[in-house]
Structures are given as structure tokens and as C-alpha cells.
Amino acid sequence: MSILSSSRAHLLLIDFQARLMPAIHDGAEVTARASKLLRGARLMDVPRSYTEQIPEKLGHTVPDLAPQPGEEVLMKSRFDACSETGLATRIAPDRRIVVAGCEAHVCVLQTVLGLIAAGREVAVVADATGSRAPADREAALARMTQQGAALVTTEMAIFEWLGGADHPRFREVIALIK
């Protein structure tokens, strides 16, 4: 599966929340990668959605990834965002869903499995996805790929959205990478 172009993608950021991120292994790096991914998506007009798990307890999305007006934030208490928010049908059916988030082995895994069960194509951004324990992250990434999700990196996603040096935002996007 290819992410193809920015016109066929939708970025989903799962539970990058203030009280959760300090517990994530390499949380600052995971957040930095997700921020680069988000900025690339914004530059190339890739639609974006967020989830927040019980925000009154875990806080809202960290400032580096804070939603802007028009970016949907779905509040949830269940780990699989599809089961509670109707996520699979909220995103346009022609879009491939590019997922980054925390924790890989809980909310990311269950949401990705829910999206796949709903017939959606999913790519998980490995370097912008974290867990408290590296072993949990690795097991979750392996399970998601076994179930049909593509595994990509931040730069893979950004460059696939870009498509080529002829993209009108090429220089701005390349500045994110450097």
C-alpha cells in the first residue's frame, strides 16, 4: 500500500497528551517527529484529526502538536477510537489514514485494528509512535503490520505526500526535513 499523494491521505494523531508524554520512552523524539509530520501535513493540506483519551485526567494535546481551528479533536474513553467516536466513517472514504500516536500497544493498536476492520487502509508512522516500554512498541508495530497496516517513517510519509520536486511547496517542505 502506498500513501500516494497528499490528496488521498488523512493524518490521525492519537493521544499525544500532556500527562502521558513524559512517561513515553524517547517521548521528546516521538513528539518532535510527530510535529514534523504535522507541519508537513499542514503545508500540503492533508486533513488532520486528533484523539484525546480522557483529557480531564491526561490533559490535552501537547503544545507542539496543538490543534488549529478546523482540525477535529475527538474525545474518548475507550482505547479504540473507532468504537466510540465513529472515526472510521468520519474520515472521507477515499482517504488512506496515516496514524501516529501513543501508546502504540494500547490506543494506537486498537484504533488501527478498528480502522482495518472497517475496511480502511492504514499506514502507521513508526518513528512518531511511542510507548512507555520499547518492547510494547515493537510488538504493537509488528502486530499492526501483520494485520495489514503499512509501516512508514515520518520522512517516508512526507516525501510520498510531496511526490516530487515539482510540488509548489517543495522548498518549504524540504526545510522541515533539514
Image (cartoon, grey):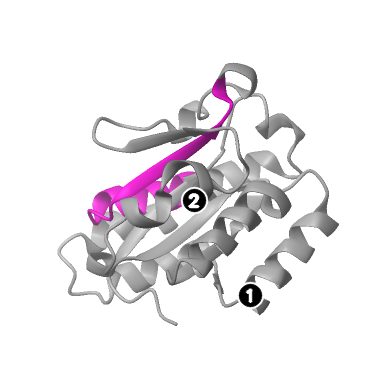
Q: Is 57 drawn above or below residue 27 in the view shown?
A: above
x, y (%) of residue 104? 68, 53
Q: Is 132 drawn above or below residue 5 in the view shown?
A: above
**How far, Cα to Cα, is label 1 from label 2?**
18 Å
Q: Which mark is residue 82?
A: 2
Q: Which residue is rendered at x = 52% and y = 68% of the image? A: 117
Q: Is residue 80 left or right of residue 45?
A: right
Residue in front for this viewpoint, 2 or 30:
2
Residue most toward the bottom?
Answer: 1
Q: Is 85 drawn above or below residue 41 in the view shown?
A: above
Residue in front for this viewpoint, 166 or 33:
33
Element under label 2? helix
Q: Is residue 178 visible?
A: no
Look at the numbered discs 1 and 2 and tell me whether their residues touch, using CB distance below 8 Å: no
Q: Residue flagged by tag 1: what amino acid is it?
A: Thr
User: Residue 58: which quarter of the image?
Assistant: top right
Q: Which residue is rendered at x = 31% and y = 57% of the image? A: 173
Q: Is 17 drawn above or below residue 90 in the view shown?
A: above
x, y (%) of residue 38? 40, 48
Classify the position of the C terminus by image quarter: bottom left
Mark 1 or mark 2: name the one nearer the start of the chain.
2
x, y (%) of residue 20? 68, 31
x, y (%) of residue 149? 55, 73
Residue in front for this viewpoint, 49 or 171:
49
Q: Is residue 30 visible?
A: yes
- Magenta part of the protein: which range? 35-55
Q: Residues within 10 Å of mark 2 (few under 14, many from 20)?
A: many
Q: Residue flagged by tag 2: what amino acid is it?
A: Cys
Q: Which residue is rendered at x = 64% and y = 19% of the image? A: 57
Residue in front for this viewpoint, 110 or 165:
110
| Residue denoted by label 1 | 145
Classify the position of the N terminus by image quarter: bottom left
